[in-house]
Amino acid sequence: MLKQFEEKMKKSLESMTNDFMTIRAGRANPHVLDKVKIDYYGVSTPVAQVGNISVPEARTILIQPWEPNLLGEIEKAILMSDVGITPTNDGKAIRLNFPELTEERRKELAKDVKKRGEEAKVAVRNIRRDANDFVKKQNKAGDLNDDEAKDYEEDVQKMTDKYVKQIDEAVETKSKEIMTV
């Protein structure tokens, strides 16, 4: 009965985790390009689907498009995105060189991670409220007796605690990754 609410909580956690992948922590991570799309024959296409993306060095991402005429498109898309790195086009491939993060920038990113974690927890708590409202309606309608309703509400709280704990752990892990020089 509560499966749909657990699915929603799980999706909130997954959404936050995917967001974390796009935050660059000083090291080159191909996931920072996940949201960058180019116009490929009239279709908005992720950069990862039009070329080979590799990490030859710790602070460099190399993008080698399968079609050389896409170099300009990819370069333009990266410049217009929120990646925050200027691409270098050598005529065959595009390189993204990640500078060392300053202490101040690391703290900003850690704050951003905490903020996104809080947003995910708020989403989970909203789902808890919806689940509890659902249980109360079922109880009023006579589909559940008072004891069953109380048991379901306890299950909802345990589920909420579980996902809030997982969110906190993910925030902690990402914050440590960002603050590590």
Image: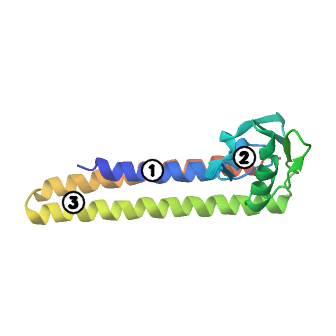
Residue 167 left/right relative to 62: left
Task: Please name whichever residue, 95 or 148, is drawn nearer the observer in this view of the structure.
Answer: 95
Seen from this angle, which residue lies furthest right? 90
Per the model, the C-alpha gap separating discs 2 and 3 is: 40 Å
**Residue at the spot of label 1:** 11
Per the model, the C-alpha gap separating discs 1 and 2 is: 23 Å
Q: Which of marks 1 and 2 is in front?
A: 1
Tell me what residue is drawn at x 14 percent, y 55 percent.
147
Which amino acid, by three-letter code, is at mark 2?
Answer: Glu
Task: Please name whichever residue, 129 or 75, is drawn nearer the observer in this view of the structure.
Answer: 75
Q: Compared to 79, does 1 lie above or below? A: above
Residue 124 left/right relative to 103: left
Where is residue 65? Give x, y as percent.
Answer: 77, 39
Residue 177, numbered circle: 2
Where is residue 18? Give x, y as percent.
Answer: 58, 49
Per the model, the C-alpha gap separating discs 1 and 3 is: 21 Å
Q: Nearer the viewer, mark 1 or mark 3?
A: 1
**Residue at the spot of label 3:** 135
Tell me what residue is drawn at x 49 percent, y 60 percent.
121
| Labels 1 and 2: the sequence-earlier one | 1
Tell me what residue is drawn at x 77 percent, y 52 percent.
73
